[in-house]
Image (tube, helix red, strand yellow):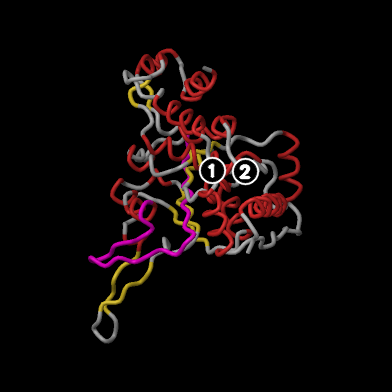
Amino acid sequence: MYKNDVEAVDAFVEKYKSLRTEIAKVIVGQDRVIEDVLIAIFSKGHGLLVGVPGLAKTLLVNTISKVLGLSYKRIQFTPDLMPSDIVGTEILDENRHFRFIKGPVFANIILADEINRTPPKTQAALLEAMQEKTVTVAGQKYLLDEPFFVLATQNPIEQEGTYPLPEAQLDRFMFNIWLDYPSFDEEIKVVKGTTTEYLPEPGIILNAEEILFFQNLVRKIPVADNVYEYAVKLASRTRPHNNGSHQWADNYLTWGAGPRASQYLIIGAKCHAAIHGKYSPDIEDIKAIAATVLRHRIILNYKAEAEGIRVGDIINKLLIQ
């Protein structure tokens, strides 16, 4: 397709710019959120979107699936949702043979809406799909189509009737992406654009084959030893009372980030570098994606809660020194 990897990275930059242009036809602002979601997709990762209702989370995922030319399914997580409602179930057909009916997880992009509203048993139904890209029903394994990407949403302010995600499942998400309210000018544009008869339709920029190519390209990007060392050192500094831990981690954290955080810091930095036209990531690329990788992997203790120390404060402290 391309003469060499350098030419491929240049092409990736242009494709990324085209993606942003098409997405901007529908989504106003949220530039950092869009960048994080696209980095996660091209890094073969999954994303957890945290934000109050009405910030266009569903519209964002739907729009991205359109511009990427991928199939998209939305699963509304509720307390009565069963694992079979996600992965599918076997039925007895007219010939008295069991036949597997695929669930909504068999799509390229899955929106797990309000994932913390369903019990852990149902949340766990996504674990195998996210990690292994397979689904097992009645002892039979079924491969999911690639690329496969789960984007889950959580409402941070409505905790009644919710089931917090276990740490093992949180760790499966490459990024924890925070959405904030739009600025005044952005909200004006949103209201103008959504209260008329004209609804913009984004065009398709990539297909599944091209996405898989660029995902593999990101993996091939070389990384200097000092960048590897910085990523591992950053993750290890979050682990309280461990060799190399930071004083703030010892004082304010119950648990720190595991090795998967180091892996995602490197993969995310590779993709962040590529979309900005660099052929190898540096420490600044690690810092650019560090908060989204670490914020759901470190757990505050009672002292941090008492003193009003937030996860973001600790991450910023670790990045400064």
As drawn, the label of residue 222 is 1
Most foreground residue, 161 or 99: 99
* Residue under the image location 31 percent in, 57 percent down: 83
Name the residue beneath numbered marker 2: 279
* Residue under the image location 48 percent in, 21 percent down: 318
Marks 2 and 1: in contact by CB < 8 Å? yes
- Kindly identify the amino acid type of the residue bearing the numbered disc 1: Pro
Q: Does the magenta-highlighted stretch encompass residue 153?
A: yes
Sequence-earlier tag: 1 or 2: 1
Q: Which residues are magenta?
A: 131-156
Extreme residue toward the bottom, this view: 95
Q: Position of residue 131 (x, y in %)?
A: 37, 51
Q: Quadrant of the N terminus?
A: bottom right
Q: Does the magenta-highlighted stretch encompass residue 76?
A: no
Residue 157 visible within the image: no
262 displayed left or right of 280: left
Density class for disc 1 (Cα within 10 Å; few <14, some 14-19, many ≥20) is: few
**Residue 2 versus residue 153 in the image, above or below:** below
In which image quadrant can residue 100 be found?
Answer: bottom left
Describe the element under mark 1 as helix, strand or loop.
Answer: loop
